[in-house]
Every structure is written in structure tokens, then in C-alpha cells.
């Protein structure tokens, strides 16, 4: 079986990017150079000429790294990026980090090793390190979640404004007793919660009876709603910061409070993307993920042309309510 660059990296105990740098004559610590060269000889590894040619065509392969393939939001971001890529004969490889920093790091290593023409990424955490990608001259655009203190082009939604829209809608419907289900402690979830809390203080204020954390997946929303119901907290509506968790919340309401399942409005983000919510009483704070992806692609092209990464764009969300009890 023919050895690959990944075999060399594993046997040498280094990253794929390090192997690539050694093979391309770039600056690497001498002891690592010797280790990689010895491993190349031992495994009889021969770099593919086709792969080498592809690596020289850096602008025609981009990386898109997102937290969750199952979330329709990121599918639409990918479509937006592809809209920019396809007319330019550029391909995109997509990796799902599952919000795992180690998995994310491996995808970034591959992007670095392949010398991609650009990276569009939703960071898994505040500590996501993009310095090696930038140092290699690869354009980077961050979407959906900002990187604190990072000088990167950043395209996202005004999440605090979205949270405020949710609270203002409930106040307008005279719904005053609310349970909240919030995603992990990342900038997106926190901004949505903070926006909601700031507007909830209006007079007369919303009484937030309970706040539960979830994992931004259906099962996390279900378990969070279970905990709220089991606490015997009384609530007239639910505010949720993630679309998949909303599905779990509505399922839990149907399982545990079937007589109220259609009486309790759920207010959250991008709920119109999920057909499972058909018939539910919801208000959807909608983003434009396709536009986020399209702008990200344009910023990659601008960086390739020499424009510095100084852009930060926050798109305004909109709120759409379904017809149902409590809604006009």
C-alpha cells in the first residue's frame, strides 16, 4: 500500500502541515526536518505530482469549516460561498468541527498543508487560533461568530438586535412569563441572550422564570425543556437561541405538556428553516445565511487581490411570526 503524507505525519509524530513545509523547502526546525526526511525514506513516500500541481493553484481550492452539517443555517452559508466560487472555477471542501477545537485544528492543518486559496470558518470557541493560516498568507473570513481580538474579516448577524426583537415581540403579544433555552457560552449565544434580557427589562417587564443551557442540537433543546417543565416553573412562552434546539423544545412540549403544546409560543432564530415546526406557534428571528456566505466569498477574493482584512459586517435580522394562538 502506497504511503501518504498523512502516514508520514503520523509516523514522524508531526503535523501534516510540517511535513508539507519540509517537502516544499520552507523553514522548519532542523530536528523536525531530519525526522520527516528519515520517515519519508523509511516509508518510501513519493509526493504526488498531481497534488503538487494542485497546491500551486492555491486560489482554486477553499476550505469552509463549520460547527454542524445538520444545521440548515450552515448549508445555506455554504451555498452562498459556492455562488462566489463556481463562476471562478474554484472548489470548496467542507469540514464539520462539531464545535470540537481538536477536530477544528485538524481541518486547519489540512487547509494549511494543501495551501488553500482561502478559509471561511465559524470558530469552535473564543480560543480558535488562526495565526498560522494568516502567517502562511491564506485569506481568512470568520462567519457567524467573531474571534475576540482577531484582525479578521468578520461577517455575522447583529445577534443582540435579534435578541431584542424576540423580547419586543413577546411584550407586544402581552406574554410576560418566559423560559429561556440558551446555547453554549459562545459570543453568538451570549449576544442573543443579552439582547433579549436588555429588552425584557422594559415596563412592564418580562418575568424570566428560568434559563437553561443546551448544546445547540435537538437533544439539547429537549433535555433543557424537560428540566424546565420538571422544575414546575410556570411560563407562557419560550425564547431559544438556536434553531435545532427549538425542534427539541417543541417535541418536549408535545411529550410532556400535550394539552399546551400549541398554546406556548416558541421564539427563536431561523425557525422557518425547519419543516418539523409546521403547525407550531412560533416567531422566527431570521438571518440571511446565504448572504453571509456570499459576502464571505467576496471578502476572500478581495484579500487575494491584496485588500487587508479590516471588514466587519453585522447584518440586521428580521422577525416573522406564524399565525396561531396569541399571534395576529
Image: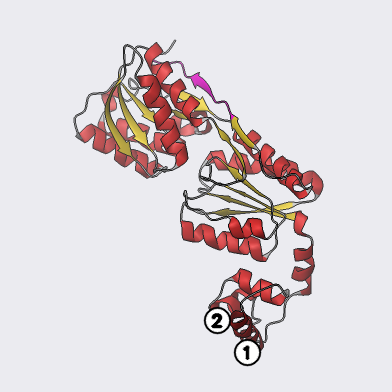
Q: In which quarter of the image is the C terminus?
A: top left
Badge 2 marks a residue whose secondary structure is helix
| Snapshot quadrant of residue 117 | bottom right
Q: Position of residue 203 (x, y in %)?
A: 33, 12
Q: Where is residue 276 in the image (x, y as percent from the top left)?
A: 45, 33
* Residue underneath mark 1: 42
Q: Position of residue 149 (x, y in %)?
A: 53, 45
Q: Position of residue 233 (x, y in %)?
A: 21, 28
| Snapshot quadrant of residue 28 | bottom right
Residue sitting at 68 percent across and 83 percent down? 45
Report if residue 320 lies within the magenta region: yes
Q: Can residue 266 be seen in this view?
A: no
Residue sitting at 22 percent across and 24 percent down? 234
Q: Look at the picture and state if 222 lies above or below 127.
A: above
Residue sitting at 33 percent across and 16 percent down? 175
Which residues are drawn in magenta?
Answer: 315-325
Q: Is the C-beta separation of discs 1 and 2 under 8 Å?
A: yes
Badge 1 marks a residue whose secondary structure is helix
Label 1 and label 2: CA atoms lie apart by 10 Å
Q: Look at the picture and state if 224 lies above or below 205.
A: below
| Snapshot quadrant of residue 78 | top right
Coloring scheme of the render?
Answer: secondary structure
Relative to 86, 103 lies left or right: left
Q: Quadrant of the N terminus?
A: bottom right
Query: N-terminal of the two: label 1 or label 2?
Result: 2
Residue sitting at 52 percent across and 57 percent down? 104
Relative to 150, 176 lies left or right: left
Q: Look at the picture and state if 116 lies above or below 193.
A: below
Crowding at label 1, few (<14), some or many (≥20) Cα neighbours within 10 Å? few
Disc number at residue 11? Answer: 2
Q: Is residue 259 visible?
A: yes
Disc number at residue 272? Answer: none
Amino acid at each position: 500500500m502506497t504511503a501518504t503524507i498523512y502516514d508520514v505525519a503520523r509516523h514522524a509524530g508531526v503535523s501534516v502541515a510540517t511535513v508539507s513545509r519540509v517537502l516544499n523547502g520552507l523553514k522548519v526546525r532542523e530536528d523536525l526536518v531530519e525526522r520527516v526526511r528519515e520517515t519519508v525514506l523509511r516509508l518510501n513516500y513519493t509526493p504526488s505530482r498531481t497534488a503538487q500541481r494542485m497546491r500551486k493553484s492555491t486560489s482554486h481550492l477553499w476550505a469552509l469549516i463549520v460547527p454542524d452539517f445538520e444545521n440548515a443555517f450552515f448549508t445555506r452559508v455554504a451555498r452562498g460561498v459556492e455562488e462566489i466560487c463556481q463562476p471562478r472555477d474554484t472548489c470548496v471542501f467542507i469540514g464539520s468541527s462539531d464545535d470540537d477545537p481538536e477536530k477544528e485544528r485538524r481541518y486547519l492543518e489540512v487547509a494549511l498543508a494543501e495551501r488553500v486559496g482561502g478559509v471561511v470558518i465559524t470558530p469552535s470557541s473564543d480560543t480558535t487560533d488562526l495565526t498560522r493560516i494568516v502567517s502562511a498568507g491564506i485569506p481568512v473570513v470568520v462567519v457567524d461568530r467573531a474571534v475576540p481580538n482577531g484582525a479578521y474579516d468578520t461577517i455575522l448577524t447583529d445577534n443582540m438586535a435579534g435578541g431584542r426583537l424576540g423580547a419586543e415581540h413577546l411584550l407586544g403579544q402581552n406574554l410576560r412569563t418566559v423560559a429561556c433555552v440558551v446555547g453554549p457560552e459562545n459570543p453568538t449565544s451570549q449576544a442573543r441572550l443579552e439582547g433579549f434580557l436588555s429588552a425584557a427589562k422594559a415596563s412592564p417587564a418580562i418575568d424570566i422564570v428560568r434559563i437553561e443551557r443546551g448544546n445547540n442540537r435537538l437533544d439539547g433543546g429537549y433535555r433543557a425543556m424537560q428540566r424546565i417543565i420538571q422544575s414546575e416553573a410556570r411560563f407562557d412562552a419560550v425564547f431559544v437561541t438556536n434553531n435545532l434546539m427549538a425542534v427539541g423544545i417543541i417535541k418536549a412540549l408535545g411529550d410532556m405538556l400535550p394539552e399546551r403544546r400549541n398554546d406556548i409560543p416558541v421564539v427563536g432564530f431561523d425557525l422557518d428553516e425547519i419543516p418539523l415546526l409546521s403547525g407550531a406557534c412560533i416567531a422566527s428571528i431570521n438571518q440571511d445565511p446565504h448572504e453571509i456566505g456570499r459576502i464571505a466569498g467576496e471578502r476572500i477574493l478581495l484579500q487575494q487581490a491584496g485588500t487587508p482584512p479590516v471588514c466587519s459586517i453585522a447584518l440586521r435580522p428580521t422577525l416573522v411570526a406564524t399565525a396561531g394562538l396569541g399571534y395576529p
